Image: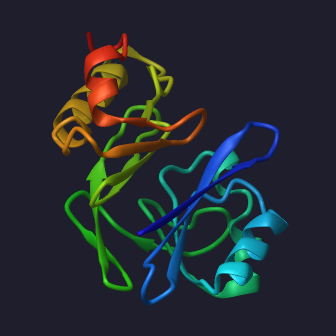
Amino acid sequence: MIVKHFMLNVHEVNSFIAADSETRDAMLIDAGDYDERIEQYLNDEGLNLKKIFITHDHYDHTDGIADYMKRFHPELISGTSPIGGCESQIVKHGDEIRLGRLTGKIYSTPGHTPVGLTLAFLGHVFTGDALFAGSVGGTSNPRDYNTQLAAIRQHIFTLPEDTLVHVGHGPSSTVAIEKRYNPFFV
């Protein structure tokens, strides 16, 4: 599996290209802004952008959707529709997404937003703003906070400990590091 990180826009949003190294089918995870570096990377690596996956509906993760849709015509996948001004295929907890020969699983991780999704492939999980390295996404009340922490414990911390955790802002981490050292869980 290919995973490439891009930091976008003034909010330093992380977007990722995930791709099947054999079929060259690629997915953009979170599209905070259109960035020529992403298009150049796809071209340089011979990758075909087949899908866009959105973890949650905050503008700093969705403002680039329309531009990518116009340029590449990928399938847009999210937990809500429309999103970023475009109609999307709605997925929910337990659904699977095929990317070439790869299969990703959707986990519900609400709290930061009412509909928050995490996408896990073998060895990699993309958490959006639910979980950060050493932190969690902000919530507006104690109920949402507790819902978010419970979802992270149940769906992310049960993945293999060496799974790389790719987050919406900041550096990536691992499941083991976050389970042991994230102050919101120890």
Q: Is residue 64 left or right of residue 82?
A: right
Task: Report which quarter residue 62 is drawn in.
Answer: bottom right
User: Residue 160 at x, y = what percent?
Assistant: 19, 44
Quadrant the C terminus occupies: top left
Q: Is residue 80 left or right of residue 62?
A: left
Q: Residue at x 26, y 18 (%)?
A: 180
Q: Is residue 153 left or right of residue 131?
A: left
Observer-nearest residue: 34 or 92?
A: 34
User: Residue 87 at x, y = what percent?
Assistant: 56, 75
Observer-nearest residue: 178 or 12?
A: 178
Image vertical order of residue 119 relative to residue 11, above or below: below
Q: Residue at x 76, y 84 (%)?
A: 71
In the rendered view, how is the structure colored?
A: rainbow
User: Residue 52 at x, y = what percent?
Assistant: 54, 71
Q: Is residue 121 left or right of residue 32?
A: left
Quadrant the N terminus occupies: bottom left
Q: Residue at x 33, y 15 (%)?
A: 181
